[in-house]
Amino acid sequence: MKVAQYSLYFSFFIFLVISVFSEAYAKEASTLNLRGFVEPVFSVELESAQRSYRLTSQSNFDFYGKIESDGLRIIPGQLLTIKNKKIKKITVSIN
Amino acid sequence: MKKLLTLALLSSMTFAVTDSATLNLQGTVGAVVDISVAALSDATNLDLTQSQSNKKVATVTEQTNTTTNFTVTVSSANGGKLKNGSREFSYSLAYGGQGVNLATGTTYTRNPDPLNANSYDVNISYTGQAAASMAAGDYTDVVTFEIAAN
């Protein structure tokens, strides 16, 4: 009778162990990678105001480069005063 | 008469030493859960300058062998934002047609459906913004789908 009792206890113990392990592994995860992108854009706007010119540039990325107008180096956003000289071209160099 | 009594006594002694025992047999099938994500190419090619409404980006398949309810939790690594360094872009997800609270994560309770795989669409929505108003580059997030048997 004792043997049967111990057998019952042992069976219950095994059942508990299996249950715990089953519970521990009854979980799983999977991932979804999302990626969005924004293309780089750059624009230059030259605005004349009386005898001066305002050159503004806009970009959505950091860059090393320069903006030149007829050999004059222009800092984006800088207010230019060019006397008796017409701007023929603006060169933008982005490295 | 004496022989008969002796025989009866021996018979009763034989019956007195009879005993029985039982052997319990039990088999166990552990709980198994499975979840897989089949991402579409659009999931990693989202043009953030164009608005999207319920654009399908993946199909998620859930499967368990449990006979009790189970749960599926959807969460975002960035709380519902695609990130480019410190820059953020908000978006929303629907899972199986239901909105997901990506800021806190959303848990869905499923009824048991042992051995059957059930698939759900994942759809993304966001409002596109002009490229000039956002820093150029890649914006990313990782969405985790976790299934757990109760």
Image (cartoon, coloured by chain):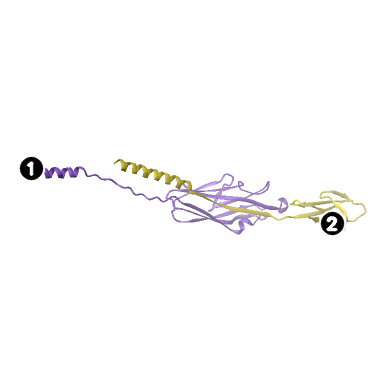
Q: Secondary structure at mark 1?
A: helix
Q: Which mark is residue B2?
A: 1
Residue B149 image offset from top left, x and y in percent: 47, 48
Can you name the residue that lies furthest to the left here?
Answer: B1
Q: Secondary structure at mark 2?
A: strand
Left or right of A74? Residue A32 is left
Pointer 2 and pointer 1 on the same chain: no
Residue B50 image offset from top left, x and y in percent: 66, 56
Q: Chain of mark 2?
A: A
Q: Nearer the viewer, residue B76 or A22?
A: A22
Chain A tint in image = yellow
Marks counted in the figure total 2
Q: Nearer the viewer, residue A22 or A71?
A: A22
The Cα–Cα distance between marks 2 and 1, rounded to whole angstroms, is: 138 Å
Specify few, some or many for label 1: CA neighbours under 10 Å numbering under 14, 14-19, or 20 or more: few
Task: Name the front one of labels 2 and 1.
Answer: 1
